[in-house]
Amino acid sequence: MTDTDRETETNAEAEPPSEMPLPSEPQVIFLGGLFALAVLTAAYVAREIVLPLAFAITLKLLLQPLMRLLERAHVPRTVASLLIILALLGGVVALGAAIAGPANAWAAKLPEGVSRLQERLGFFRGPINTLRNFLQQVENIGSTGAPNAANGPLVGAGLLSFLFAGARSFADALFTTILFLYFLLLAGDSFLRRLVEILPGFRAKRQAIAISQQIESDISAYLATITVMNALVGFATALVMQLTGVGDPILWGTLAFLLNYAPIIGPALCTFAFLLAGLLTIDGLWGALAPAGLYLAIHIVEGETLTPLILARRFTLNPVLVIFSFVFWFWMWGIPGAILSVPMLAITKIVCDGIRPLAALGHFLSG
């Protein structure tokens, strides 16, 4: 064998084959499907624990660069984790205090503005009444008694009970997330080190480290980019609401910033909220539509142009699968699931790209 043949054979062994292996045994496909179904079922049943843990892992990826910066400044890990948690809680409390007053003012203004909304949206009254009567008739089909009229005080009490339960659930989830986040920041790379120690070969150890580093790099960059773009959207929205005469720019800018994390449903809710705010505060019809229209223009520029161009350098995802992931996780976990849908899909793609038996699935997830 000549030197050229030996070199060709060595290169062929060193370079991985271009084909993507697919499972050929039915048992592997069947067991993989059962495992995925079991994991999703557990995530749905135990969502009160799994959802805060998923949020904590996502926040850890976002805050990991700051944690490494503090470590390079020779700040002990315990102190650095505590400082980050206190800064995060301080930001949440300060933001809540800043928007509490304007939110209460708009909540008090809303009952008085219902009549104003009815007058300005009078041309919708006919179709809405027709639809309501039709739905009432469909609901009464098969019922033997007269339809029960809703009692006003009971409805109000039910609304207050619902809001109280929602606030309590949010507080519990926030506390659990902060607790998980603190210990994840404190643990650092200890879980990765333990995983590398128990893996059987050097190739598997190197693969685990490469996948972990890529997840941390890409997802932290994605989350940081999304956060910066959402902050710009919030600032532009606050400026628009101030210039159009709606007022309370901090409230509306914060609302745009937070809801922009949820694809599709967040901008839709913001557009509806700004439409109602414009109709309640601005006299002219076109002027009342201006806040919602300008916000929609801001969202289109950010969501359809700037953010995709910036993120395309790191990874791209199949847009159809992004929508499917959004709908699925929104059904599983509500709005928090919608917020986590894209990061979880991106992490899944990175893991599949790094593990050769799953490379076909990673290729299918790519844009």
Image (cartoon, rainbow, N blue to C red):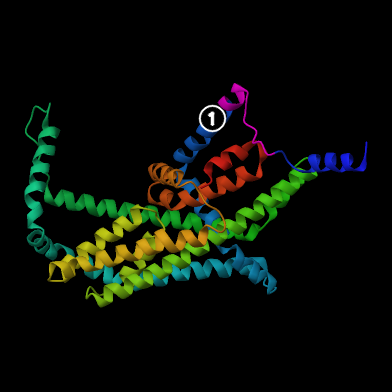
Which stretch is magenta?
18-30
Q: Of 118 and 353, which appears nearest the observer?
A: 353
For the point 42% across and 58% down, which residue is it? 261
Residue 23 part of the magenta segment: yes
Image spot of residue 85 (x, y percent): 53, 66
Q: Residue at x 31, y 64 (%)?
A: 297
Most frequent secondary structure within the magenta stretch:
loop
In the image, 107: left or right of 351? Answer: left
Residue 292 pos. (x, y %): 25, 64
Residue 201 visible to the viewer: no
Disc 1 secondary structure class: helix
Determine the residue positioned at 62% across, 28% down.
23
Can residue 243 be spotted in the picture? yes
Return the residue nearer the eye: 233 or 37.
233
Q: Magenta segment: does it hold 53?
A: no
**Outermost residue to the top:** 26
Figure label count:
1
Q: Is residue 75 above or below residue 203?
A: below
Above or below residue 250? Residue 199 is: above
> In the drawing, does residue 44 fall left or right of residue 362?
left
x, y percent for residue 315 = 55, 53
Position of the N terminus, as image quadrant, is top right
**Position of 307 compared to 79: left or right?**
left
Image position of 24 with respect to 276: above or below: above
Mark 1 — residue?
A: 33
Corner quadrant of residue 144: top left
Q: Give the residue type that dot 1 points to.
A: Gly
**Image coords of residue 50 (percent x, y):** 50, 46
Vertical placement of residue 136 versus 217, above or below: above
